[in-house]
């Protein structure tokens, strides 16, 4: 499918919160010119129209059933599967925001609908498209540090600072019924760990609701992962850090990789050189660049020139890992995903 045709496909964006609006603006920037939106909040539908001329639908069924060929599911997590199922029944190719869901219930029905209609699916884990993790993945694939022994991931930010214009207690992140909690929100780190090191053999987690935040979900998780290939990793996630942080360290037999998102560059130390090499981001690099790169990848998937980096099946594995971590938090026992 040529790019000009792909961008002309009628595309429904379901959910017009912050991530939905970001995708809408980027789609418009990339040349998508037939955009339909649905959100139960009228002010969000109006903002989507102002932002990029998207046509507000009168219902979810109208959005996906009015000739749409592609659907972006950018609702709160607990609403991902119902919206994706309705879109799949209508024959829409699917872009679903991470995480795929907050439960495994209903996943097999979606898998079957996607298979039956031969739909292209991409579950959006935008950190795979960020300069930092993408560079780490390339270095690992090149064997830059030899056999990996261990790794650590750390990500956190004070929840009320995420969207300061909103009451954090009403955000989906703060509410179990909407699929919130730092494990599902922080699935980026779990996804990157699998992307870097393969499938997880066993997971153990300690944490829970440990702060004074008025939420009914876990705000802290310290996770230990053992991979089938033999490496191990720790993952720290929280809603508590007052200064945003995201970093990764990989230790191999022949070197070390370091990355801190706020500093930008990936740093590589190798035993052969006994020195550090830096891999800075491109000049003028911004956070939005990874979201644009993600959409460009999806466009090429629709064209048939690339395979989805994280399709429904791959995202299902990441979700199973997150659910195993949640189970370990609840039971205090190690879990095999």
Image: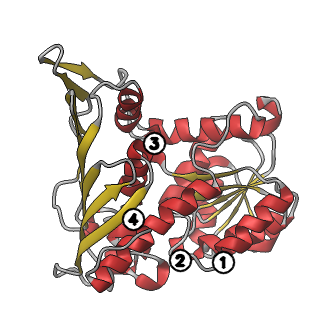
Q: Relative to 29, is 336 on the left or the right?
A: left
Q: Disc 2 vs disc 1: Cβ atoms closer than 8 Å?
A: yes
Residue 170 appears in which quarter of the rendering?
bottom left
Query: Is residue 211 placed above or below 316 in the rendered structure?
Result: below
**Residue wearing tag 2:** 103
Image coords of residue 294 (percent x, y) = 55, 41
In this view, the residue in front, 259 or 270, is: 270
Q: Earlier in the sequence, mark 3 or mark 1?
A: 1
Residue 73 appears in which quarter of the rendering?
bottom right
**Residue wearing tag 3:** 128
Q: Disc 4 vs disc 3: Cβ atoms closer than 8 Å?
A: no
In this view, the residue in front, 135 or 17, is: 135
Q: What is the distance, in whole Å, between disc 1 and disc 4 at their CAs?
A: 20 Å
In this view, the residue in front, 38 or 249, is: 249
In the drawing, what numbered circle is on residue 106?
Answer: 1
Q: What is the distance, in whole Å, between disc 4 and disc 2 at their CAs?
A: 14 Å
Q: Disc 1 vs disc 4: Cβ atoms closer than 8 Å?
A: no
């Amino acid at each position: 499918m040529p790019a000009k045709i792909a961008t002309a496909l009628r595309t429904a964006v379901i959910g017009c919160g912050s991530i939905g609006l970001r995708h809408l603006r980027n789609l418009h920037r990339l040349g998508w010119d037939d955009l339909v939106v649905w959100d139960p909040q009228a002010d969000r539908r109006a903002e989507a129209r102002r932002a990029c001329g998207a046509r507000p639908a009168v219902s979810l069924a109208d959005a996906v059933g009015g000739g749409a060929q592609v659907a972006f599911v950018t609702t709160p997590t607990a609403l991902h599967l119902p919206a994706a199922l309705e879109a799949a029944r209508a024959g829409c190719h699917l872009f679903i925001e991470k995480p795929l869901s907050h439960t495994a219930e209903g996943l097999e029905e979606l898998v079957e609908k996607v298979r039956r209609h031969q739909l292209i699916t991409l579950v959006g884990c935008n950190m795979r498209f960020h300069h930092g993790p993408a560079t780490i993945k390339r270095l690992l694939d090149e064997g830059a540090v030899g056999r990996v022994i261990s790794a650590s991931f750390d990500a956190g930010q004070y929840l009320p600072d995420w969207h300061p214009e909103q009451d954090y207690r009403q955000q989906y992140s703060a509410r179990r019924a909407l699929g919130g909690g730092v494990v599902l929100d922080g699935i980026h780190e779990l996804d990157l760990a699998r992307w870097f090191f393969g499938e997880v053999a066993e997971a153990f987690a300690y944490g829970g609701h440990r702060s004074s935040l008025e939420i009914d979900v876990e705000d802290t998780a310290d996770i230990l992962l053992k991979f089938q290939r033999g490496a191990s990793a720790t993952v720290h996630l929280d809603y508590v850090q007052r200064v945003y942080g995201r970093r990764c360290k990989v230790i191999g037999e022949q070197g070390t990789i370091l990355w801190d998102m706020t500093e930008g560059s990936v740093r590589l130390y190798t035993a052969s050189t006994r020195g550090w090499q830096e891999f800075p981001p491109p000049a003028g690099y911004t956070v939005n660049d990874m979201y644009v790169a993600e959409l460009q990848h999806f466009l090429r998937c629709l064209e048939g020139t690339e395979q989805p980096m994280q399709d429904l099946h791959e995202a299902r594995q990441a979700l199973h890992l997150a659910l195993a971590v949640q189970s370990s938090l609840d039971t205090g026992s190690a879990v095999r995903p």
